[in-house]
Amino acid sequence: MPRLFAALRPPPEIRDSLRAVMTGVSAARWQSDAQLHLTLRYLGEVDAGTAQDVTTALAAVCARPITVQLAGVGAFERRGRVDTLWVGLTPHDALRRLHHAVDRALAAVVAWPAARTFVPHITVARLAHGAKVADEIAQWQRFHAAVASTAFDFTHVSLFESELAPGGAEYREVSRRPLQD
């Protein structure tokens, strides 16, 4: 069964900017270019029929292109240890509205795993649970705290399939829907 998520993909020049911060933490598994995205909703495993319904539901989402900027960095913890490094995005309001529109469209089609608070971000690294690099992470956060970009647009919502592989998850775009007025 495919593992699906709805996401926004930044343009190539922004992905280049993101790769510039991907250094300085020895235990980090830095994301590849193909993995750089903002997740709107992770759906998990669904059967083939539901996957088609998800594609149809996403096609019905009405939203305009969203202009944002990269803005700062952060980390997520699990069980008291940092497991994810990320770059933030601003402004949050338009991204939250799109997140809610996607949720509304998908709610009738599929139930997703327990929801977390939506924090607009692009994951740049994952860390193994046992990695002991707290000092490196703190230094990375201080060094990149002011990361920013020029304004750029998210112009499409994409549905991706995620397949777990030995080197990390591999993503394949299943469908793409333009954001338009």
Image (cartoon, helix red, strand yellow):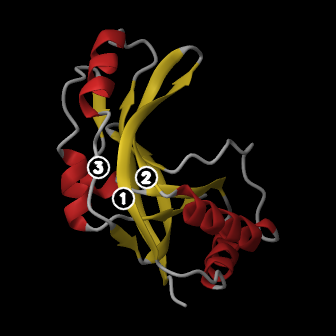
Residue 172 falls in image quadrant? bottom left
Residue at numbered disc 1: 69
The image quadrant where one finds the N terminus is bottom right
Residue at numbered disc 2: 89
Q: Secondary structure at mark 1?
A: strand
Of the residues under marks 1 and 2, which one precedes in the sequence?
A: 1
The image position of residue 97, as x and y in percent, is: 65, 66
| Residue 3 visible to an observer of this rendering | no
In the image, residue 181 sits, relative to residue 112, either above or below, namely below
Between marks 1 and 2, how big is the CA–CA gap?
A: 6 Å
Residue 148 shows which numbered tag?
3
The image position of residue 169, as x and y in percent, is: 41, 46
Whether the residues at callouts 3 and 2 have beta carbons within 8 Å, the answer is no
Whether the residues at callouts 1 and 2 have beta carbons within 8 Å, the answer is yes
Between marks 1 and 3, how big is the CA–CA gap?
A: 7 Å
Q: Secondary structure at mark 3?
A: loop
Instruction: Please name the residue shown 49% across and 61% down the image.
Output: 161
Looking at the picture, tell me which residue is in the foreground, 5 or 105: 105
The image position of residue 4, as x and y in percent, is: 57, 59
Q: Secondary structure at mark 2?
A: strand
